[in-house]
Image: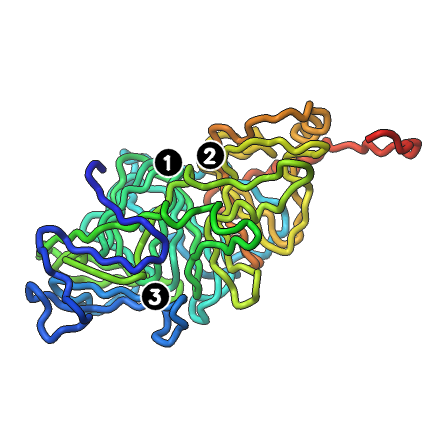
Amino acid sequence: MAGLKYMSGFGNEFSSEDPRCPGSLPEGQNNPQVCPYGLYAEQLSGSAFTCPRPANKRSWLYRILPSVKHKPFTSVPCGDLTENWNEVEPDPNQLRWLPFTIPKTSEKKVDFVAGLHTLCGAGDAKSRNGIGVHVYTCNTSMVDRCFNNSDGDFLIVPQQGEILITTEFGKMMVEPNEICVIQQGMRFSVDVFGETRGYILEVYGAHFELPDLGPIGANGLANPRDFLCPVAWYEDRKVPTGYTVINKYQGKLFACQQDFSPFNVVAWHGNYTPYKYNLKNFMVINCVAFDHADPSIFTVLTAKSTRPGVAIADFVIFPPRWGVADHTFRPPYYHRNCMSEFMGLIKGHYEAKEEGFQPGGASLHSIMTPHGPDVDCFEKNSTAELKPERVAEGTMAFMFESSFSMAVTKWGLHTCQKLDKNYYQCWEPLRSHFNPNWKPGKQ
């Protein structure tokens, strides 16, 4: 959307006023007896009041009417959104899904909330410790409806179709190859411009942050300056027919009615905001001699657990880069992991499985389930000439990696009808190359 403005930085103390109302931020205090322009002051807390300063998150919103003015919440159907991890029996198999179907507008109008489908997850929103992986498939903009997640943060990864997200903090246009994060409690509405699909990583009980860089030093991976936050924008709009606020609370959906737009924030300041990031700005670190570094070098954002070095969830990407390692099988190695690995593909062809893994599809390799390159990838790269080459050109794959052992939903295993029952066959032709007469020679 032409003309949208942003502020840059990650976790900064921002302040913003809609230019139609200069001076709308109170000077020198958060909560004056009377706010400029007759606005209401409202704080949105993203952390406990007593959190250490580096982890303390809150913003002050100055709005035409406070969000407390609404009719009572009532339960509404959840559709395919769930936090029931016991719908079906556990399945430790390697799982792969073909691209998820986007409903045709001519058949049924589906907006962002109606198009949410939970694929897998673990943990519990009540105890504030867990994760959910969802896809969204929609074709219609939200009209006089907004969404509010009381359970956790949404990291949204568009795969097909740009989305215009209106929030209480302002507007963001998010295109495929960009991501955005809508943090817990922030109200937002999604406009789409055709058939639209993407992935969502939801975390309960922690917020996303930039990973520590350690020996990498001060610069690299996702740089703070490349994260963008919206600027204040308000609408003073009455909705006599009723504006619906949909609240995801303890894994269920509830709705309430009010007679005005919730996007009535004239000014705000704080460090608890929605934000977006363009994946092309990721500064890749890679091997330049031999062997592999772990895929953790591709971490964009992490939601840390209470155990040092162990994440509730990492968001990892595999962007275009140079492959130059000598004496090395360059694609991903065969692996069994104490973490769960959910992968999606935004565009292009993933190097380890060029055919079966498609944009808009997904795979899940559960804890300790073996996985790795298919037979074609192994054979080709075991004999390839190891010259410098571009890897993943025109491709963007990503991974949601979690320390939780994720359960797959009934929708994911059955209802969506996109599970590739033949996935295991990509490894069936692997053959033994063992030669008991091999002798050490010049390597």
Q: Are marks 1 and 2 in contact (CB under 8 Å)?
A: yes
Please name the residue that numbered disc 2 is placed on. 359
Give the image location of residue 114, x and y in percent.
Answer: 32, 49
Query: Looking at numbered disc 1 in the image, what kind of residue is underneath it?
Result: Gln
Please name the residue that numbered disc 1 is placed on. 160
Taking the spot 58% from the left edge, 26% from the top edge, the residue there is 389
Quadrant in the picture for the C terminus = top right
Taking the spot 20% from the left edge, 68% from the top edge, the residue there is 42
Taking the spot 62% from the left edge, 46% from the top edge, the residue there is 294
Q: Is residue 200 above or below residue 394?
A: below
Q: Residues within 10 Å of mark 3 (few under 14, many from 20)?
A: many
Please name the residue that numbered disc 3 is placed on. 57
> Which of the marked residues, 3 or 1, is nearer the chain's N terminus?
3
> Which of the marked residues, 3 or 2, is nearer the chain's N terminus?
3
- Please, what secondary structure does the residue beneath circle 3 have? loop
Q: Are marks 3 and 2 in contact (CB under 8 Å)?
A: no
